[in-house]
Amino acid sequence: MVLPKDIPSSAENYMDSQTLTKLPISSILIIIAMQTEALPLVEKFQLSEDQKSVFPKEVPWVRYQGIYRNLQINLIWPGKDLALGVDSVGTISASLVTYASIQALHPDLIINAGTAGGFKAKGASIGDVFLVSECAFHDRRIPIPFTVLQVFDLYGVGLKQAWKTPNLHKELDLKVGKLSTGDSLDMSAQDESSIVANDATVKDMEGAAVAYVADIFKVPAIFLKAVTDIVDGEKPTAEEFLQNLATVSAALDQAVTKVIDFISGKCIHEL
């Protein structure tokens, strides 16, 4: 959304949120954890890698940017770990890049897109793309006894609602489910109990961290998660994940494209 020149970028502090939601969306921030997931979207939207980074020179984060259907698209991939050369997955990188991107780019809307494990008991199948209704953590266990002033257990769960998008859901007929986030690809018995308590259909390693930061800065955020592996299935998670990553990333690409096409020309409240 284009703001008057005399209003600072952190306009949430100066303008009523109801006013902001009535302005057309003009800037979208896509947070995506893995290069394999990111590159199809970079190609689809004809984005260019930013050669003059808006981020500190010490970090490996990569920004791809461009214009698609009159929308400024900024796709941020956390890059490769500087020591080990693998994708910088997980909640720490997700939190950092979300925070830095909001500060540098001032998006109207955040889309966290990525692959996830799904639960067949909740109706998930390989290749399904879910529009997330809410995010929570399953590995931040803080079992300090409840008092009037302390609710550490709830803080650990960190439940956050995704931005409500009834029109998007209806138009694209996407599956809807709850997301549970943790920093491990596998699932321990304790994780499983928390995931069940979270009523999750899909699990990932970034979503709730993105939601936490977006909520702090009151930036609307939506989450698209494509299922690469069935957590409660028969195949080992890592094997099934790697086997389906490329194919499911293509399905994710198609879903994100449809979402962006739907968003073009609309205001936040029209989603």
Image: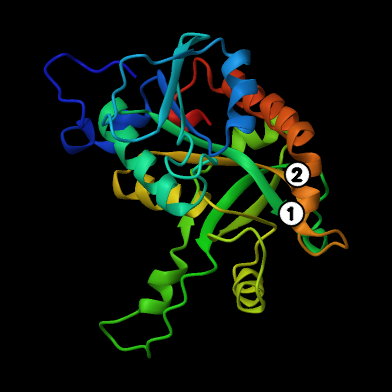
Residue that appears at 75% across and 44% down: 242
Q: Are marks 2 and 1 in contact (CB under 8 Å)?
A: yes
Residue 43, x across and y down, in percent: 61, 14
Say the numbered circle drawn on residue 238. Answer: 1
Q: Using the image, determine if residue 231 lies above or below residue 81.
A: below
Q: Using the image, determine if residue 102 lies above or below residue 89.
A: above
Quick one: which residue is furthest to the right in this view? 234
Q: Using the image, determine if residue 163 lies above or below residue 136.
A: above
Amino acid under disc 1: Ala
Of 95 and 3, nearer the camera is: 95
Can you see residue 73? no
Residue that appears at 70% across and 32% down: 249
Of 239 and 176, nearer the camera is: 239
Q: Is residue 14 left or right of residue 238?
A: left
Q: Is residue 13 left or right of residue 50?
A: left
Q: Name the image quarter holding the N terminus.
A: top left
Amino acid under disc 2: Leu
Quick one: which residue is furthest to the left in this view? 6
- Crowd around label 2: few <14 · some 14–19 · many ≥20 (10 Å): few
Residue 144, x across and y down, in percent: 37, 87
List the residue tagged with mark 2.
242
Label 1: which secondary element = helix
Q: Is residue 15 left or right of residue 220?
A: left
